């Protein structure tokens, strides 16, 4: 199954980088755009475990806010200040899935992690990023039905 159109566009943009370090720099710049979810969405810390991405060492939390037309806005918090990959993934998921058809989120494949971050990603980091996808899919399914 193809990735959502905005992720396909991101992958096309990332493919311009021949050097792996340039690609990583582009993902770091993506992470620099990370803005934590507002307290009006998250509530006070500590955040509820029900919003925590499974297997994510960066302690990523996800909230799915219903929007008009059966669509959703995705909000993220990443508790580990060194969680650059988690922050980049949060920006990518928000920018590519918020306001789109919920099926794009519900059907997002774990393969997107390797397509974006490369097959060299460590198993632990990869599992955490897949956990973020799992949490987005689960929340979207729950709210869409």
Image (spheres, grey):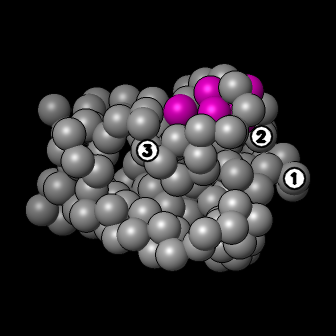
Kindly identify which numbered label has been placed on residue 112: 3
- Sequence-wise first label, 1 or 3: 1
Compare residues 5 and 144 and report the one nearer the observer. 5
Label 3 crowd (10 A; few <14 / some 14-19 / many >=20)? some
First along the sequence among labels 2 and 3 = 2
User: Marks 2/3: CA distance?
Assistant: 19 Å
Is 6 within the magenta?
no
- Residue furthest to the front in view is 18
Q: Assign the C terminus to one quadrant of the image.
A: top left
Residue 55 in view in this figure: yes
Prevalent SS, magenta region: helix
Q: Are marks 1 and 2 in contact (CB under 8 Å)?
A: yes
Residue 136: image location, x then y, percent: 42, 40
Relative to 32, 41 lies left or right: left
Residue 58 image label: 2
Q: In the image, is residue 132 above or below residue 95?
A: above
Decide: is 62 above or below 8. above
Residue, x 12% and y 62% (percent of image)?
69
- Magenta segment range? 124-130
| Total residue callouts | 3
Residue 79: horizontal and vertical position, in percent? 79, 47
- Indicate which disc residue 82 carries: 1
Q: CA distance from mark 1 to mark 2?
A: 8 Å
């Amino acid at each position: 199954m193809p990735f959502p159109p905005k992720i396909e566009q991101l992958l096309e943009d990332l493919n311009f980088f021949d050097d792996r370090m340039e690609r990583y720099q582009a993902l770091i710049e993506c992470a620099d755009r990370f803005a934590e979810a507002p307290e009006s969405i998250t509530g006070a810390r500590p955040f509820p475990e029900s919003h925590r991405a499974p297997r994510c060492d960066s302690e990523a939390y996800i909230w799915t806010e219903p929007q008009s037309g059966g669509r959703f806005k995705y909000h993220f918090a990443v508790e580990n200040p060194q969680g650059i990959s988690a922050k980049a993934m949060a920006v990518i998921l928000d920018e590519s899935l918020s306001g789109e058809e919920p099926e794009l989120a519900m059907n997002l494949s774990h393969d997107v992690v390797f397509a974006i971050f490369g097959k060299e990603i460590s198993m632990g980091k990869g599992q955490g990023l897949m956990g973020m996808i799992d949490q987005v899919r689960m929340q979207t399914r729950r709210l869409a039905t």
